[in-house]
């Protein structure tokens, strides 16, 4: 667990860890997350790419999740987000950037397709954010969790939290495809980044509380190689 006084230093550290991996293993597989938290990290990576300090030309990437029903040109789809914040500003080969297809005719088949791609290309480093209710990707708290990529119904609190990106809460999709807990925990290393006082309670629950399906992020305690980057606000209860 590393703590930072401000967000900027945290973003720099995360970008440094990703850059180091790209140097050590140019053909690495990166796991990416969306949401507001990683935006500063992608900005740093784009800046470093522009200065010639890194290349994604031989890398692959998997995103954790995608909304069901949004096309890639929808500004709130996670494909659009990744294009906008990272892919189109770098030398990523688009064919090597995987994101679940939320408009696939057969969503179950899409989940199986995603899992076979993941099996073929194990993730070296998975970047994660966390939801206020402890979700990672879109693995929502509940009585049970799912290992594989699957279709989820979003919790009302998740739709409410993400409504800020849409014109109204009604427009927030009700379902998503997400990598499962098993696929996430299979990543060789995990980089969890959390900022803001509103996440302080869930950080404490996830990292110092019991391992429970009621807080999916608590399962990270079972992984041998997790780095957590916290700003002062997010770490204040830990
Ligand atoms: C979203 C995403 C997660 C993300 C989380 C927190 O719903 N599916 O991958 O980590 O919620 O988002 P934010 O960083 O905007 O708080």
Image (cartoon, helix red, strand yellow):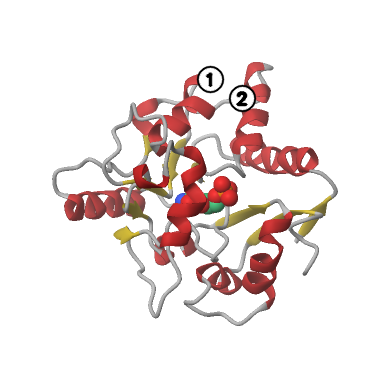
The residue carrying mark 2 is 46
Residue at 38% from the left image edge and 46% from the top image edge: 172
Under 8 Å from ligand 1: the CB of mark 1? Answer: no
211 to 169, vertically: above or below: below
Drawn side of residue 106 relative to residue 133, left or right: left
Horizontal and vertical percent position of residue 127? 56, 49
Horizontal and vertical percent position of residue 227? 68, 58
Horizontal and vertical percent position of residue 150? 29, 59
Check disc 1 and report its element: helix, strand or loop. helix
Residue at 42% from the left image edge and 41% from the top image edge: 168
Observer-nearest residue: 70 or 185?
Answer: 70
Residues under numbered marks 2 and 1 in contact, where contact means CB atoms less than 8 Å apart: yes
Observer-nearest residue: 60 or 218?
Answer: 218
The residue carrying mark 1 is 89
Figure label count: 2
Drawn side of residue 198 relative to residue 231, left or right: left
Q: Quadrant of residue 77?
A: top left
Q: Residues within 10 Å of mark 2 (few under 14, many from 20)?
A: many
| Disc nearer the start of the sequence (2/1) | 2
Residue 126 visible, this orientation: no
The N terminus is located in which quarter? bottom right
């Amino acid at each position: 667990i590393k703590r930072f006084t401000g967000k900027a230093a945290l973003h720099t550290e995360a970008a440094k860890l990703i850059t180091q991996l790209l140097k050590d293993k140019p053909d690495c597989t990166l796991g990416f997350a969306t949401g507001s938290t990683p935006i500063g990290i992608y900005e740093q990576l784009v800046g470093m790419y522009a200065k010639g300090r890194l290349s994604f030309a031989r890398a692959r990437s998997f995103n954790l999740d995608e909304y069901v029903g949004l096309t890639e040109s929808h500004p709130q789809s996670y494909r659009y987000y990744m294009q906008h914040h990272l892919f189109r500003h770098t030398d990523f080969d688009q064919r090597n950037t995987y994101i679940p297809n939320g408009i696939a005719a057969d969503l179950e088949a899409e989940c199986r397709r995603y899992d076979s791609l993941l099996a073929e290309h194990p993730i070296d480093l998975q970047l994660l954010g966390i939801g206020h209710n402890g979700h990672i990707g879109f693995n929502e708290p509940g009585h049970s969790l799912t290992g594989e990529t699957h279709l989820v119904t979003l919790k009302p609190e998740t739709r409410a939290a993400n409504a800020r990106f849409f014109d109204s809460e009604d427009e927030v999709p009700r379902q998503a495809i997400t990598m499962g807990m098993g696929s996430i925990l299979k990543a060789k290393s995990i980089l969890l980044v959390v900022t803001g006082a509103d996440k302080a309670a869930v950080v404490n629950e996830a990292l110092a509380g019991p391992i429970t399906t009621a807080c999916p992020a608590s399962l990270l305690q079972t992984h041998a190689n997790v780095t957590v980057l916290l700003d002062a606000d997010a770490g204040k209860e830990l």
